Every structure is written in C-alpha cells, then in structure tokens.
Image: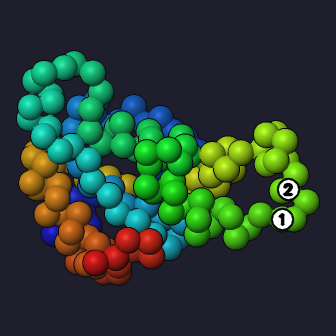
C-alpha cells in the first residue's frame, strides 16, 4: 500500500469535485489543518450497484455526505461535531441553538468546509477498498494512524 495511490489533497470548501467518478469504489483520507484525522471507504457491492443503476454511487456519494455536515446517518460528521465543533462552542451561542437559528449540522458543515481536506484512491472492488482502508488506518499508507479512527 502506498500513498502514491491517492490523489492530491482537495479542500471541502471546493466541493463538489468533478474529477471523482460518478460510480467508483475507493478509500479516502481526511486532514484537519495538516493533521491526518480520518480514513474511510465507499463502494460496497460496487459491481452489483454499478450495473443496476446509472445513479451516482460509492466514493462520490460518501464524500458528498461528509461535505454536507449532516449528522444523521454520517458517522464522520458525528465525530467532527463531537470532537471539534461542540468543544469550540461559546456560551453566548447556546440560545441560538435553542431558538433554531443555529444548528449543529450547520456548524459542522462550516467547520468541514473551513478546516478539512481530503484525498482519495480509486480501486476496482469493495474488497480492495476494505483492504486499503484497514492498512491506512493502521498507519501503513501515510506513516501515521488517523486521529479519529485508528486501528
């Protein structure tokens, strides 16, 4: 496993990324201000899904979910909210949450777009994605384990 399999880094501020194929299995790494914080994969059952539907599936939909900042159904966004966003909240902001003028989803999206970058590696199968993600989380790709989900 080698870091040269990965794309250059892209800022979530520039999402969406037209270079990512509409249907693809892959692994991605995410950095916060230069620190590697997370690895993920997408594209389970990519062979079956790709043939069944022309819709977007796999890596692009997973990264889109992360870029949205929505906590519902996205474990990465939950990690970002819990570990980075909530600790940064100020007491004077709490009434804004109570009134609904500010939401944790909104703050999480802003944080992701302001501070996070990603790189991705395309693979042929979900088995390859799983293997590369596990190796990466052990620190075998970029030489360090991610802050949020190491193995």
Q: How is the image coloured?
A: rainbow
Residue 119, position in %: x, y?
Answer: 37, 55
* Mark number, residue 64: none
Q: Is residue 34 above or below residue 106?
A: below
Question: Which of the pair 64/114 is nearer the observer?
Answer: 64
Q: Quadrant of residue 9?
A: bottom left
Where is residue 95 drawn, in percent x and y? 88, 52
Count of labels in the image:
2
Quarter of the figure with the C terminus? bottom left
Q: What is the C-alpha distance between the residues marked 2 and 1?
A: 5 Å
Quarter of the figure with the N terminus? bottom left
Please identify the residue farthest to the right as the structure is shown: 92
For image coordinates 58% across by 69% down, the residue present is: 83
Mark 2 and mark 1 residues within 8 Å of each other at the beta carbon = yes
Residue 42 locus on image (x, y percent): 26, 47
Q: Residue furthest top?
A: 54
Q: Give the percent coordinates (x, y) of residue 76.
A: 45, 56
Residue at horizontal 27 percent and vertical 21 percent from the top: 55
Residue closer to the observer: 141 or 47: 47
Look at mark 1 in the image and give the residue it sits on. Answer: 90
Marking on residue 93: 2
Q: Residue at x 58, y 53 (%)?
A: 112
Q: What residue appears at the point 10 percent right and 24 percent down from the top-left corner? A: 51
Lateral position of residue 91 relative to residue 31, left or right? right
Looking at the rendered structure, the secondary structure element under dot 1 is loop
Label 2: few (<14), some (14–19) or many (≥20) C-alpha neighbours in 10 Å = few
Q: Is residue 130 above or below residue 13?
A: below
Residue 137 as seen in the image, left or right of residue 119: left
Disc 1 residue crowd, few under 14, some 14–19, many 20+, Cα 10 Å: few
On the question of residue 61 being in view, the answer is: yes
């Amino acid at each position: 496993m080698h870091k040269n399999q990965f794309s250059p880094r892209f800022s979530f501020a520039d999402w969406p990324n037209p270079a990512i194929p509409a249907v693809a299995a892959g692994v991605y790494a995410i950095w916060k201000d230069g620190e590697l914080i997370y690895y993920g994969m997408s594209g389970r059952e990519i062979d079956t899904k790709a043939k069944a539907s022309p819709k977007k599936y796999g890596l692009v939909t997973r990264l889109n979910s992360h870029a949205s900042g929505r906590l519902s159904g996205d474990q990465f966004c939950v990690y970002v909210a819990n570990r980075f966003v909530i600790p940064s909240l100020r007491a004077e902001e709490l009434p804004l949450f109570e009134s609904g003028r500010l939401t944790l989803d909104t703050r999480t999206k802003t944080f992701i777009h302001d501070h996070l970058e990603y790189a991705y590696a395309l693979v042929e199968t979900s088995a390859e994605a799983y293997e590369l993600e596990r190796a990466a989380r052990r620190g075998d790709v970029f030489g360090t384990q991610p802050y949020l989900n190491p193995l």
